[in-house]
Image: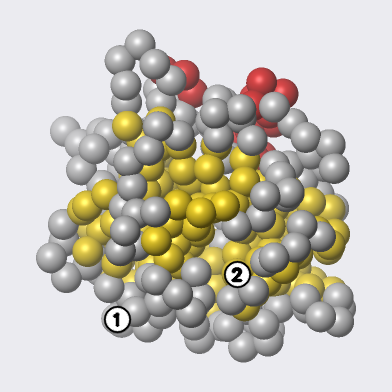
């Protein structure tokens, strides 16, 4: 597989949106990482709760992911370093104490924290000193890091299919969806020209992704064993971020608006409009296992 350096990725980073994201839409800080905020919204009724801002630091706060017990929200947090490129580590927001701690603090940058099923670990994408982007695991108790797939790169995003199989967004001339089993470096191509969102369907076990070969872009599903593919539903124009909750409801954002949709519905349903709060350009989303909280990412909000 052809490898891409960070320099080559800069002209395409708005699509890739990972690692040393040199150029992304929205407010951009020195060296290119966008300023983004993470908001936590309760979904206990038809009317969502007031968004609670998770991050306390300005900068790149992104890629939220809940733990399997729903007690912690992991996310990527930037450390701004004077006269040096931005560097990111993984933060953990405790939903009970409402306090944030750091999972790791390395010289390298880590992105895309994802709980590893069946273990007390997080899988992350690390940008290594030689600019390789590979899948690593962080032991939650010790902070020790281990390389999971030495021969598979450059990895942009990932989602676990089961404790041994992972679906990955691979960077290249075309952004492609691959499936790899731990203990091997065999990477099976599942789809090409995909968006950055990858999820596992809670019922069927299918891998969900964004098919950019369609106009408009579509959420698509592929079964990891049979390889049967189907189109699920269209996204809003130029939208490539979505999530699915444990009940099988899909969620996405469009500007300041939050939407949901069940399979079989004819359209996206407006859940909330956060424009009055200054929240705009909703991108990444994640729901907790109980499906009563959603984390959303927006452009940085400057409060008056």
Question: Looking at the picture, how far across and down is residue 203, in whole percent?
Answer: 62, 88
**Quadrant for the C terminus in the image:** top left
- Residue 254 in the image: above or below residue 17: below
Question: Looking at the picture, how far across and down is residue 230, in whole percent?
Answer: 82, 75
Q: Earlier in the sequence, mark 2 or mark 1?
A: 1
**Quadrant for the N terminus in the image:** top right
Q: Quadrant of residue 23?
A: top right
The residue carrying mark 1 is: 44
- Residue 32 in the image: above or below residue 79: above
**Residue displayed at 30% across by 63% down:** 141
**Residue displayed at 48% across by 79% down:** 118
Q: Residue furthest top?
A: 83
Q: Quadrant of residue 11?
A: top right
The residue carrying mark 2 is: 160
Q: CA distance from mark 2 to mark 1?
A: 27 Å
Q: Residues within 10 Å of mark 1 (few under 14, many from 20)?
A: few
Residue 107 visible? The answer is: yes
Question: Looking at the picture, how far across and down is residue 227, in whole percent?
Answer: 86, 76
């Amino acid at each position: 597989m052809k490898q891409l350096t960070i320099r080559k990725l800069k002209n395409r980073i708005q699509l890739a949106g990972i690692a040393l994201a040199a150029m992304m839409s929205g407010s951009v800080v020195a060296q290119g990482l966008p300023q983004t905020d993470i908001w936590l919204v309760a979904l206990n009724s038809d009317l969502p709760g007031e968004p609670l801002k998770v991050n306390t630091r300005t900068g790149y706060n992104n890629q939220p992911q809940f733990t399997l017990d729903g007690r912690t929200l992991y996310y990527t947090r930037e450390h701004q370093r004077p006269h040096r490129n931005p560097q990111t580590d993984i933060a953990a927001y405790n939903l009970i104490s409402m306090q944030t701690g750091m999972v790791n603090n390395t010289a390298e940058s880590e992105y895309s924290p994802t709980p590893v099923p069946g273990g007390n670990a997080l899988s992350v994408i690390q940008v290594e000193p030689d600019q390789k982007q590979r899948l690593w695991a962080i032991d939650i108790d010790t902070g020790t890091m281990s390389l999971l797939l030495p021969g598979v790169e450059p990895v942009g995003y990932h989602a676990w299919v089961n404790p041994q199989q992972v679906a990955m967004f691979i960077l290249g001339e075309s952004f492609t969806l691959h499936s790899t089993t731990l203990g091997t470096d065999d990477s099976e191509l599942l789809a090409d020209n995909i968006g950055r969102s990858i999820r596992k369907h809670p019922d069927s076990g299918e891998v969900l992704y964004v098919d950019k070969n369609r106009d408009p872009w579509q959420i698509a599903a592929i079964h990891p064993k049979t390889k049967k593919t189907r189109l699920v539903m269209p996204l809003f124009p130029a939208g490539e971020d979505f999530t699915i909750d444990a009940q099988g409801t899909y969620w996405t954002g469009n500007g300041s608006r939050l939407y949901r949709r069940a399979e079989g519905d004819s359209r996206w349903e407006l859940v909330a409009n956060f424009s009055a709060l200054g929240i705009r350009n909703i991108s990444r989303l994640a729901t907790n296992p109980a499906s009563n909280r959603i984390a959303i990412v927006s452009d940085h909000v400057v409060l008056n």
